[in-house]
Image (cartoon, helix red, strand yellow):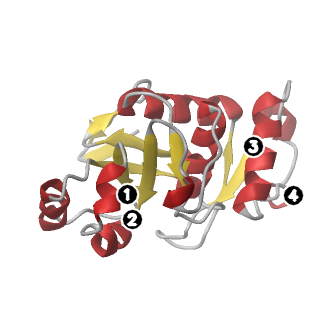
Amino acid sequence: MLAGIASLPVTSLRPVRGTAAEIVALLRAWDAADDPTPLVVETSGSTGRPKRVVLSRAAMRASADATHERLGGPGQWLATLPPTYVAGLQVLFRSVRAGTDPVERAADLTAGRTYVSLVPTQLHRLVDDPALARFDTVLVGGAALDPALRERADRAGVRVVTTYGMSETCGGCVYDGRPLDGVRVDVVDGLVRL
């Protein structure tokens, strides 16, 4: 699948852009296509300048499906992250894979199982809201989670699962310190390799 893009300069590949609704429509068509071109996302630039990352449909599907398997099954997602970065894009794609529509307001959730993905700052702001405990799982990634905040969430009945990943791994690939199915983690010369 990637052989067709080998001759294209990376600058000719356009990153995913648009509103959440536009991206969901793109993802539904992309997931159903016979031989889709890969998706391109931009990194946040946390280690320097933002870069473009090419993601295959097989990798996106494996990530979304492994997440649902780890969390106990497919469900509906509340979209709280920017949809053009990998974490927000995966929230939308997990919804597509689950056959549900992602929503931007918790009041609009209709599925039996419900999930939300947050960064630690969002969790800090929402941890005392009883509505957060109604989610089957609250994924938290993008930065380290302060143990005191996790304890607060636990006391509030919020089921938090910490995630680690990057654009190149289609988002979170290690949940609560355990790799998702299909992910191998090695430590080589003191460095973690995924």
Q: Earlier in the sequence, mark 2 or mark 4?
A: 4
Q: Is residue 103 above or below residue 115?
A: below
Rate crowding at label 4 as few (under 14), some (14 to 19) or many (20 or more) other CA atoms within 10 Å: few
Please report contact status of discs 3 and 2: CB closer than 8 Å, yes or no.
no
- Quarter of the rendering containing residue 59: top right
Please report contact status of discs 4 and 3: CB closer than 8 Å, yes or no.
no
Q: Earlier in the sequence, mark 2 or mark 1?
A: 2
Look at the numbered disc 2 and give the secondary structure of its residue.
Answer: loop
Q: Earlier in the sequence, mark 3 or mark 2?
A: 3
Tell me if I can see residue 12 in this picture.
yes
Q: At which x and y percent is residue 194?
A: 41, 38
Nearest the eye: 26 or 116: 116
Residue at mark 2 = 119
Rate crowding at label 1 as few (under 14), some (14 to 19) or many (20 or more) other CA atoms within 10 Å: many
Amino acid type for the residue under numbered disc 1: Gly
**Residue located 77% across and 39% down the image:** 28
**Residue located 80% across and 47% down the image:** 26
Give the number of the disc on residue 12. Answer: 4
Give the number of the disc on residue 141. Answer: 1
Amino acid type for the residue under numbered disc 3: Leu
Please report contact status of discs 2 and 1: CB closer than 8 Å, yes or no.
yes
Which tag is nearer the camera, tag 2 or tag 4?
Answer: 2
Q: At which x and y percent is residue 5?
A: 83, 41
Look at the numbered disc 4 and give the secondary structure of its residue.
Answer: helix
Residue at mark 3 = 27
Amino acid type for the residue under numbered disc 4: Ser
For the residues marked 3 and 2, what is the alpha-carbon distance in whole angstroms? 23 Å
Amino acid type for the residue under numbered disc 2: Val
For the residues marked 1 and 3, what is the alpha-carbon distance in whole angstroms? 23 Å
Q: At which x and y percent is residue 33?
A: 84, 29
**Would residue 79 appear left or right of 159 to someone viewing this image?**
right
